[in-house]
């Protein structure tokens, strides 16, 4: 027997998915102007926020497979935005560092992203933003708990 959802459940979920698609489409445009992708930007942001890190840690941080992060880092390295260095005790362990060019790229894209966000949210009051934030956090918690995540 197939589980049923209410129309309200489906409408809410549909609105959340539609919002995610709009965010993705607009973000792609911001990133494409600089010649990078959202995942590449996420790697740069992680390196700016947390400093150099092992490839495995970066994979965990981004919730992607090690093979996936390797491809992302390869492309960033080709663009001169990151570089690899060997770990001290294990030469097989790659530590990823952001370059000056990578930091400059991150800064440019972060400004564009912030401007886009500010523009998108300009019509919301402080109370509406607080309500939106609270509802989205609640949805994230409930969705995670529905599949046994904590």
Image (cartoon, rainbow, N blue to C red):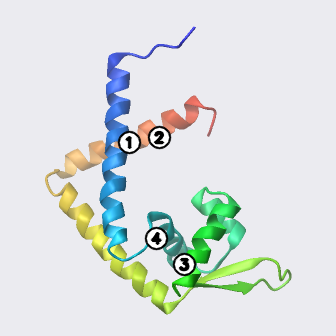
Q: Are marks 4 and 1 in contact (CB under 8 Å)?
A: no
**Residue 76 got which mark?**
3
What whole-number distance in Å separates the C-alpha atoms at marks 2 and 3? 31 Å
Return the residue at label 2.
140
For label 4, the residue is 41
Of callouts 4 and 3, which one flags the residue occurring earlier in the amino acid sequence? 4
Say few, some or many: other residues with alpha carbon within 10 Å of mark 2 (under 14 / 14 to 19 / 20 or more).
few
Name the mark nearer the viewer: 4 or 3.
3
Q: Are marks 2 and 1 in contact (CB under 8 Å)?
A: yes
Q: Position of residue 54 (x, y in %)?
A: 70, 74
Give the mark nearer the N terminus: 3 vs 1. 3
Locate residue 1 relative to residue 9 in the image: left or right. Answer: right
Q: Residue at x 35, y 32 (%)?
A: 14
Mark 1 falls on what kind of element?
helix
In space, the residues marked 3 and 1 are separated at their CA atoms by 32 Å
Q: Which comes sooner in the sequence, label 4 or label 2?
A: 4
The residue mark sitting in front, 4 or 2, is 4
Q: Quadrant of residue 13?
A: top left
Between marks 3 and 1 in the image, the one whose residue lies nearer the viewer: 3
Task: Point out the residue furthest to the top here.
Answer: 1
| Residue 132, percent from left and from top | 29, 44
Residue visible at 83% across and 83% down?
91
Please, is residue 124 above or below residue 28 in the view?
Answer: above
């Amino acid at each position: 027997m197939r589980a049923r959802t209410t129309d309200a459940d489906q409408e809410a979920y549909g609105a959340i998915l539609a919002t995610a698609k709009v965010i993705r489409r607009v973000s792609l445009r911001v990133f494409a102007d600089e010649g990078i992708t959202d995942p590449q930007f996420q790697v740069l942001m992680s390196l700016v926020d947390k400093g150099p890190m092992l490839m495995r840690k970066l994979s965990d941080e981004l919730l992607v497979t090690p093979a996936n992060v390797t491809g992302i880092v390869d492309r960033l390295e080709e663009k001169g935005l990151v570089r690899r260095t060997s770990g001290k005790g294990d030469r097989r362990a790659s530590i990823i560092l952001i370059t000056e060019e990578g930091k400059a790229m991150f800064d440019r894209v972060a400004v564009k992203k912030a401007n886009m966000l500010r523009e998108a949210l300009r019509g919301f009051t402080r109370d509406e933003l607080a309500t939106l934030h609270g509802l989205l956090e609640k949805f994230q918690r409930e969705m995670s708990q529905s599949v046994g995540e904590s």
